[in-house]
Image (cartoon, rainbow, N blue to C red):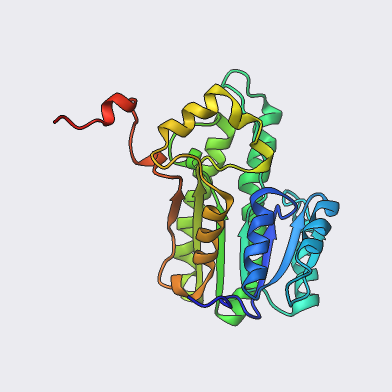
Amino acid sequence: MSKDRFQDRVIIVTGAGSGLGEDYCHGFASEGGKVVCADIDEATANRTVQSLKRSANVHIAVRCDVTKAHEVERMVEETLHTYGRIDILVNNAGVIRRRSLVDTTEDDWNREIDTDLKGPFLCVRAVVPHMMERGYGKIVNISSVAGIVGCISTAYSASKAGVNGLTRQWALELAPHGIRVNSVAPGYTATPINEKVRQTAAAKRIGEIIPLGWGKPADITAAVLFLSAKESDYITGQTLAVDGGLTTTVDMGPEYRTIDK
């Protein structure tokens, strides 16, 4: 596998200011990509760009609230003005509010659906015409295991299930234009932001339930880069769960994993 898979490719990553989004940016930059680091917090987007300075290419930071069409369109315009094209879009920006059904407010619902479901729609709608002109493009939507099994909260699960549905629909519509659309559904991933949470009894139990334990950012980034690269050109409309086996089964506890002798 070439370490220059994204040489001269132009990649937009939303939610690039921290967490997994920042990790994706580093992955693309390390393999020759030109990265547009978009985030609602421009300061964190700039910080990500600064951290990419050791790569050979020039990267840019763009402030973008993905729930607002005019800001998404401006992000696309700035990308085209700087680089002249868009090859890859990673829809990563998202929010999560852990609420029970009865505690989920209308504001909770609107914020998560707007960011996690409407956001990818607005970004894809803005980017696709430019990909169509060139007859090529890769779109990777960041979903979640919560879109496959019930494990987080009402609004979040609904938004991520919606993302998986949109991935299939867009793949069907855009295939004639040479555009591939796939989703990555991360499982429980160890990041700096959840370091304290991972010390709790509940988090340790989650690690026991997952067949391969908690994941690492590099595990998710590898999948995102694969679905953005040439070697995945014959894959479209798929949701790849990168979850250590979490969605493969219902785990009844360690005593049920022992095979009778």
Which is nearer the eye, 121 or 236? 236
Residue 11 % position (x, y): 66, 69
Residue 63 vs residue 135: left or right? right
Q: Can residue 63 be seen in this view?
A: no
- Compared with 34, 206 (above or below) is above
The residue under the point 53% across, 43% down is 160
Farthest-out residue, front = 261
- Compared with 196, 248 (above or below) is below
- Compared with 256, 177 (above or below) is below
Quarter where residue 234 is shown: bottom left
Which is nearer the eye, 224 or 119? 224
Residue 108 % position (x, y): 68, 30
The residue under the point 55% across, 30% down is 154
Residue 185 % position (x, y): 50, 48
Farthest-out residue, top = 102
Residue 54 % position (x, y): 76, 70
